Amino acid sequence: MSDDAAAILAALRSGGRRITTARRLIAEILAGAGQHLSAADIALSVRDAHPEIHLSTIYRTLESLCAWGFVDQVHQPVGPSFFQLAGTHHHLVCQQCGRIYDVPAAAFDDWIARLRDTYGFELHLGQTALAGRCCDH
Amino acid sequence: MSDDAAAILAALRSGGRRITTARRLIAEILAGAGQHLSAADIALSVRDAHPEIHLSTIYRTLESLCAWGFVDQVHQPVGPSFFQLAGTHHHLVCQQCGRIYDVPAAAFDDWIARLRDTYGFELHLGQTALAGRCCDH
DNA sequence: ATATGTGCAAACGATTTGCAACCCT
DNA sequence: AGGGTTGCAAATCGTTTGCACATAT
């Protein structure tokens, strides 16, 4: 098991939350696998070993992990959200090919500062992927 | 009828498209009413005078008007898209109160240029509202 | 023991589609 | 007359919810 997954489980335990099969599996999948997994993707991975774990449980587990700050749900302008360990990078999604690019959050800092200064608006890029066209399209 | 609506209808006519009740009504609603109307909002407005016009017709009409460049569909991170006359401003949506703020597209130009230079990614803000918190929250 | 999680089915909101009938040009 | 549009119902996709049952602590 990856360190990240172990850390989540340890945090759950010390926070008085229960460790369940679904939570353990999903923490491992998110920590171990590539990024940008939708709930359905996760369901597929889970199904191999534990076909009884229902999609709604996956949604509920992800919702909890998000609420507790371990996981980020990233909305796309169109199509399903994806989920990943709570992190510090933001996302660009190519509307042509669907590929998702990670960009360090720091790259957006001055833009965010400018919107805040000019419009009094605090931009939250953590839960939204920005749409556009990548260099291959 | 507003000038904008008349212009759309004229463009339809000269483009060999048909003028139908749904198209005329929706052009007028989009031109005349406040911004940020969802398909359901438009359906409500239409229903008063023409209860026979079905929601699916509204979606199809909006789809056509978007495809022909008269209207923009703006996706929100969560909740229904909204529609408006094709324009030059982008959108900030407050996740707390749901209010939508218009920002001139020019305000994003250097940001878009920077993403293009650094990541080879061409950001398209026209069809996506940016999420965050407004100054009242 | 008991609250917290889960399986399942069913509902949900937003949008799309198949198809026959319609009506703009 | 003809084909682009429409009405309607039904399907779709992603996600949420109600409820009885199960299980981690």
Image: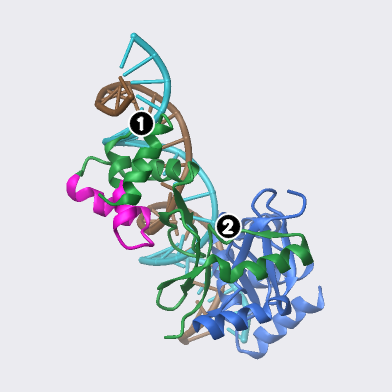
Chain colours: A blue, B green, C brown, D cyan
Closer to us: mark 1 or mark 2? 1
Which of the labelled discs sits on residue A2, or is there none? none
Is A112 placed left or right of B29 in the picture? Answer: right
Q: Secondary structure at mark 1?
A: loop
Rendered image: mark on residue B18: 1
Q: Is residue A41 magenta?
A: no
Find disc 2 in the rendering and name its residue.
A80
Q: Nearer the viewer, residue B97 or A134?
A: A134
Left or right of residue B65, residue B34 in this image = left
- Residue A25, image quadrant: bottom right
B41 drawn magenta: yes
Q: Observer-nearest residue: A59 or C7?
A: A59
Q: Can you say whether B44 is above or below A22 in the image?
A: above
User: Observer-nearest residue: D3 or A84?
Assistant: D3
Tell me if residue B56 can be seen: no
Q: Which residues are magenta?
A: B26-49
Type of amino acid under label 2: Pro
Chain of the residue under the numbered disc 1 shown in the image: B
Report the front residue among D22 and B81. Answer: B81
- Residue placed at 61% from the left, 84% from the top? A113
